[in-house]
Image (tube, grey):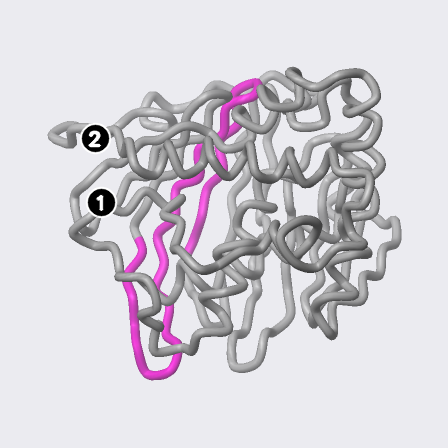
Amino acid sequence: MKLNRVVFSIVAATIALAMTVGLALAADNPFSPKKPPFKTAIVKYTLKGTSSGKEVLYVNGLDRAIHTDAKTTVFGMTNEQKTITITKQKTITQIDLVEQRAIESGNFMYYMAQEYDKLSSSEKATVRKNAEGMGQNLAGMMPGMDVKKRKGKLMGKNVEIVTVMGMTSYVWEDTGITLKTEGSLGPIKINSAATSVDTNVSLPGSAFAVPAGLKVVWDEQADQQQRNMAKQWMDNLKDPNFGKNSGKSGMGAMFNTQRPTYQDGDDSSQREPAGEEDSSGGAEEAVEQGMKVLKGLFN
């Protein structure tokens, strides 16, 4: 596992968690994406700190593609990151231009939406109530996860400013687009800031394209794990005692990290066996496996 994936999954998921369901619960199905108030967008970012480089976000309706070109140095290890992540309603395609591979699996949020649609009206009400309290429940489980929110302006946009675990994120209202993230997690220094935002513009043909010469491989194992996890999460969220339990049900079951999940699309040759720790320590591994699922809830 590359350390930069661990670190930034934690950061993104932690910030996203703080947004909780205020954005999503306005929809009939809180796990279905909400269309932004524009048809297309291009957002360019500069990355500084532990990770340095640039990033471009392309938005086309409900589809998003993030192109990253950066280097990350942590604990004496430097990783080059040249990736494209294409997120559509039903699928997520992870393209690694360094390793020359493209892996695709189902979108976890699509499976969550499917599971939600199967519920009765009363179960849906319970899920929505439990989802609203999920951030507070998690804060109780994880010291230092006090969440502070406030409204503000950035680049002329209305933003929700969220601070949690030493990280502050500026999220453009009604779009789910993060315009700025800054702060630190121990030795990890994060500074990602949008330098330009253009809406209702023509997108380049390369925005959502798989580079020539790369064959997209469907990761059946990762896809099945996401289907299983979606069912597990929904079973817990529909539990009237959710948040009160800490063992086989409730919050404890949501973050069962006994087996690794490979939502980043790694093929089996790159996967680490259960119990193997990254050199950055097992704590980050445990947080990543549960928290990266939350990333999709609020982005």
Q: Is residue 266 magenta?
A: no
- The region drawn magenta spans 54-81
Residue at 37%, 32% (x, y): give it.
223
Give the CA distance from mark 1 to mark 2. 9 Å
**Amino acid type at image mark 1:** Asp
- What type of secondary structure mainly makes up the magenta span? strand
Q: Look at mark 2 in the image and give the residue it sits on.
A: 217
Q: Are marks 1 and 2 in contact (CB under 8 Å)?
A: yes
Taking 42 as reference, is 115 above or below it?
above
Which of 132/182 is in front?
Answer: 132
Quarter that holds the N terminus: bottom left
Which quadrant would residue 263 be assigned to in this image?
A: top left
Taking 234 as reference, is 115 above or below it?
above
| Residue 81 point in image, percent of width and height | 31, 56
Which of 187/251 is in front?
Answer: 251
**Amino acid type at image mark 2:** Val
Residue at 52%, 26% (x, y): give it.
111
Q: Is residue 64 magenta?
A: yes
| Residue 253 point in image, percent of width and height | 61, 52
Regarding mark 2 in the picture, which secondary structure is present there? strand
Going by the image, does 149 lie left or right of 247?
Answer: right
Q: Look at mark 1 in the image and give the residue it sits on.
A: 267
Residue at 43%, 62% (x, y): give it.
6
Among numbered discs 1 and 2, the one appearing first in the sequence: 2
For the question of whether residue 10 can be seen, the reply is yes
Regarding mark 1 in the picture, which secondary structure is present there? loop
Going by the image, does 141 lie left or right of 284?
Answer: right
Which quadrant would residue 274 be assigned to in this image?
A: bottom left
Taking 184 as reference, is 45 above or below it?
above
